[in-house]
Amino acid sequence: MLLEVDHLEVEFATGQGPLHAVRGVSFEIAEGEVLGVVGESGSGKSVTAHSILRLLPGNGAIVGGDIRYRGGSVLQYSPAALRSFRGPKVSIIFQEPGRSFDPIYTVGKALEETLRAHNPEMPETEVRERSIQLLRETHVPYAEQRLHNYPHQFSGGLLQRIMIALALASDPDVLIADEPTTALDVTIQAQIIELLLELKEKRNLAIIFITHNLALISEIADRILVMYGGLAMEYGAAGEVLAHPRHPYTRALLASILILGEHYSKETLHTVSGGTPDPRRPEPGCPFAPRCPLARAACRETVPALVADGTYHRCILAGEKPEDLYARD
Ligand SMILES: Nc1ncnc2c1ncn2[C@@H]1O[C@H](COP(=O)(O)OP(=O)(O)O)[C@@H](O)[C@H]1O
Ligand code: SF4
Ligand SMILES: [Mg+2]
């Protein structure tokens, strides 16, 4: 397997005590496969992504589980091994564009830096050719001229393409895109998704696409991981998760994007109501219980186990027919 995240646990030290941001999350990704990671803000998506590259802030630590790249534990890598892992093996587009760009550098300079970081001996002409090639591959028009422009001279959509070009400059096997399109309008978002699909095909690139928008990844994902309160709530083949969601949270996310009442009873959850959990004071049981229309007393006692039945899902009602549970009128 290309990349495996195996019962990952991440904690942050905070003034109010430890915060358990990722609570035993597992998934895997094969070459050329797209994994969609979906969940509301604060569910642990970015922390999971940063953990893969061991890029947690100083107060964060991986306290359990393992991350394996082609069978070897990334957690055991030496500093040198880590340097040749970050970029050439797994590359990330951060949620904050400021982490990809320095406003005082032209796009050409940014590409040159990344190319040289991994190939210090690369001749000047090749750096230029490769930079132009990367911009063309990501469909940035007038690639040659645009090398001389600064980040603020690009539209959001073009900047996004350049961020992808930068992430590809190290020729990775896996691209992690952390909510890359959130600030863009719907048409531009769709174009970025199209570009990612094209790169997946052309480069056999594996992609981890993180988003809070389940609709967005339904077009692109081979597998979907639904996170909530630091837990994997549902995980499985995209077709299965989208067509037959087993978990009430996945159903709620889907209901919020589907046409009124098409798939659900009159008690549809058109938006997922209620607030997300406070990870400093996690519920003893299922973190979704305060918002779940099917919650019962037992849900609040212990965190339900992940059950494999069509998909992996974490709910005490696993195994019961969802249609029966939702049809109440
Ligand atoms: N440096 C940090 N210190 C303390 N808590 C953090 C830090 N970074 C993230 N967290 C917490 O970890 C949880 C998961 O965050 P994150 O992975 O960023 O969520 P998201 O799913 O929105 O990407 C949140 O509760 C967040 O507040
Ligand atoms: S365990 Fe209970 S609260 Fe949690 S999703 Fe299942 S039914 Fe809802
Ligand atoms: Mg995030």
Image (cartoon, helix red, strand yellow):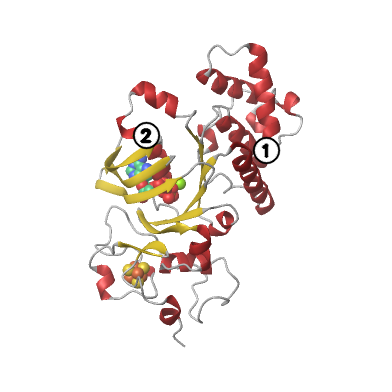
Q: Secondary structure at mark 2?
A: loop
In the figure, residue 114 lies in which quadrant?
A: top right
Kind of residue at badge 1: Leu
For residue 251, say whether it is visible: yes
- Compare residues 72 and 61 and report the one nearer the observer: 72
Number of the label disc, if any, that sits on residue 158: 1
Q: Residue at x 53, y 67 (%)?
A: 243
**CA separation, marks 1 and 2?**
29 Å
Q: Secondary structure at mark 1?
A: helix
Ligand 3 under 8 Å from disc 1 Cβ = no
Figure check: 135 above or below 197? above
Q: Position of residue 311 (x, y in %)?
A: 42, 62
Q: Position of residue 204 (x, y in %)?
A: 57, 39
Kind of residue at badge 2: Arg
Mark 2, residue position: 54
Would residue 182 be found to the left or right of residue 19 on screen? right
Figure check: 163 above or below 125? below
**Would you call the spot at circle 2 few (<14 residues within 10 Å), some (14-19), or many (20 or more)?**
some
Count of numbered circles on the image: 2
Number of the label disc, if any, that sits on residue 30: none
Q: Position of residue 222 (x, y in %)?
A: 53, 53
- Compare residues 102 and 64 and report the one nearer the observer: 64
Q: Residue at x 71, y 31 (%)?
A: 136
Q: Residue at x 59, y 42 (%)?
A: 200
- The mark nearer the N terminus, 1 or 2, is 2
Would you say the residues marked 1 and 2 are in contact, meaning their CB atoms lie under 8 Å apart? no
Would residue 209 be found to the left or right of residue 62 on screen? right
- Compare residues 189 and 327 and report the one nearer the observer: 327
In the figure, residue 274 lies in which quadrant?
A: bottom left
Q: Residue at x 56, y 54 (%)?
A: 217
Figure check: 206 above or below 267? above
